[in-house]
Amino acid sequence: MGVSRSYLRDRRKGGQWPQGTYWVYLNPDNPRSGIRYNVRLCLSWFTDRGTHQHDRAVHDYLMSTLPEQPAPGAEPSTSTQKNHAYR
């Protein structure tokens, strides 16, 4: 993303980037395992924070993480989880 580790840390610790939305631990049971960032949302935050466009990007991401709801009368899906945007 072109920023320092300390900049990323400051966004996490300052509360601007909530865990689970902007970043996750690679192994939640071991915080020293490393961190994976949602690059798309972080870049949107850099360029569009405080705007409807960024709010929409966060909303769309959060909606994409919800389990799919079957249509009324449809068979339940066999997929267990959607792909996440973390890289």
Image (spheres, rainbow, N blue to C red):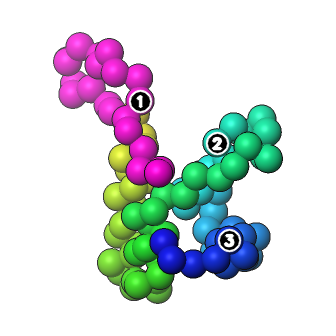
Residue marked by disc 2: 26
Is 67 left, or right, of 25 in this rendering? Answer: left
Q: Which residue is mark 3?
A: 5
Q: Are marks 1 and 2 in contact (CB under 8 Å)?
A: no
The image's mark for residue 81 is 1
How far apart in space, not on screen, are marks 1 and 3 (Cα)?
Answer: 30 Å
Q: Mark 1, residues whose alpha carbon is within 10 Å: few (<14), some, or many (≥20)?
A: few
Going from the N terminus, do you reach mark 2 or mark 3 first? 3
Q: Nearer the viewer, mark 2 or mark 3?
A: 3
- The disc placed on residue 70 is none
Work out whether residue 64 can be spotted.
yes
Residue plotted at (23% across, 13% down):
75
Prevailing SS of the magenta stretch: loop
Determine whether the residue tagged by mark 3 lies in a helix, strand or loop: helix
* Magenta-tinted stretch: 68-87
Asked if residue 10 lies left or right of residue 66, the reply is: right
Q: Quadrant of residue 60?
A: bottom left
78 in the magenta segment: yes
| Residue displayed at 79% across by 47% down | 32
Q: CA distance from mark 1 to mark 2?
A: 17 Å
> Residue 4's spot in the image, x, y percent?
64, 77
User: How many angstroms separate mark 2 from mark 3 (CA)?
Assistant: 16 Å
Q: Secondary structure at mark 1?
A: loop
Amino acid residing under circle 3: Arg
Q: For the point 54% across and 58% down, which residue is it?
A: 37
